[in-house]
Amino acid sequence: MKRYFDFYASMMRMSVLEQWQYPVANYFYMIGMLAEPVIYMVVWSAVANQQGGSVGGYTPGSLAAYYIVWTLVRQMNIAFTPYGWEWRIRQGRLSMSLMRPIHPLHEDVAFFAGWKVVMIVLWIPLALALSFFFKPDLHPTLLEGIIFFVSIWMAYLIRTITLSLLGMVTFWTTRVSALFELYFAAELIFSGRLVPLSLMPEWVQQAAWFMPFRWAFGFPIEALVSSMTVNDLFAGLGMQLAWVFFGILVVSQVWKVAIRQFSAVGG
């Protein structure tokens, strides 16, 4: 355990130092991702005003809060994609990773976790600017704030695991783009990324409970923005934990089979 702790601490420290060298690039990257939530916010705020001031239990102020928090959760969702797995195998990078005495996934998790620390700090001024223009209605309790902080890291782990499983398909095929697009379409519908799940049909809300998408995106936002009961908050954390442990189990089993298909390429 000490070896893993030292590895994660060192890798995260390196990632933080590396990303702090490029604050402008990171800011432009974050700003480029603001168009999506701002469009959603404006559209659904207009719908809420037309519906008498609220839609699906959300007022324009709570919608503003939802999509401003959305921007942070989206940053936490960024992980090594299946396209990265394609690149890593084609370029022979995986061969180097396999020579190290630690599973390659640990490097991905640790590096991106360090990046998240930088992104959270850089996100705060952007959140303040968005709050100035859109006036969010956000009054979280201390418990909601703590659960939100824990849940965004759990969400990061869930999405890392699911994308890694999808990326392992590249051990059998050189292209995974079609499956990734299918995954992305399902994520839009069942995660709360497109709209809060309370605005979706009942069957979508029920199905989303049993899928990882909601726990990797919608739940952290709802934990901070919605007035969830204490039982619902801890039930959500429980579902996140269940998905993390289930995902780790599946990844370990799939990896044992997938790595046998690996052929070193690149130069």
Image (cartoon, helix red, strand yellow):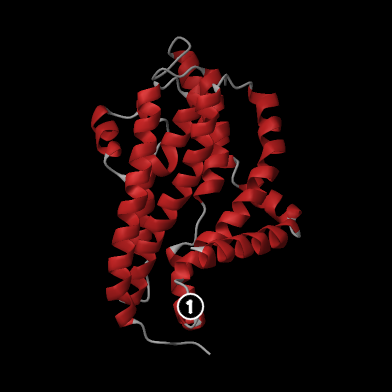
Q: Is residue 84 left or right of residue 32?
A: left
Q: Is residue 181 left or right of residue 106?
A: left
Q: What type is the residue that disc 1 sits on? A: Pro
Q: Nearer the viewer, residue 14 or 63?
A: 14
Q: Nearer the viewer, residue 142 or 36?
A: 142
Height in image: 201 above or below 162? above
User: Considering the numbered disc 1 on the image, is that residue within a helix, a strand or a loop?
Assistant: loop
Q: Would you identify the image quadrant in which residue 239 lies?
A: top left
Report whether residue 155 is seen: yes
Locate residue 248, reporting x and y percent. 35, 58
Q: Nearer the viewer, residue 31 or 79?
A: 79
Q: Residues within 10 Å of mark 1 (few under 14, many from 20)?
A: few
Which residue is the extreme one toward the top? 52
Q: Would you identify the image quadrant in which residue 31 lies?
A: top right
Height in image: 123 above or below 179? above
Report whether residue 39 is seen: no
Q: Would you identify the image quadrant in which residue 25 lies?
A: bottom right
Locate residue 79, reporting x and y percent. 50, 57
Which residue is the extreme one toward the bottom? 267
Q: Residue at x 47, y 73 (%)?
A: 102
Height in image: 176 above or below 62? below
* Residue ID for mark 1: 101
- Number of marks drawn: 1
Locate residue 250, reporting x and y percent. 29, 60
Q: Residue at x 42, y 87 (%)?
A: 264
Locate residue 39, reporting x and y percent. 54, 34
Q: Residue at x 50, y 60 (%)?
A: 109
Q: Is residue 140 left or right of residue 209?
A: right
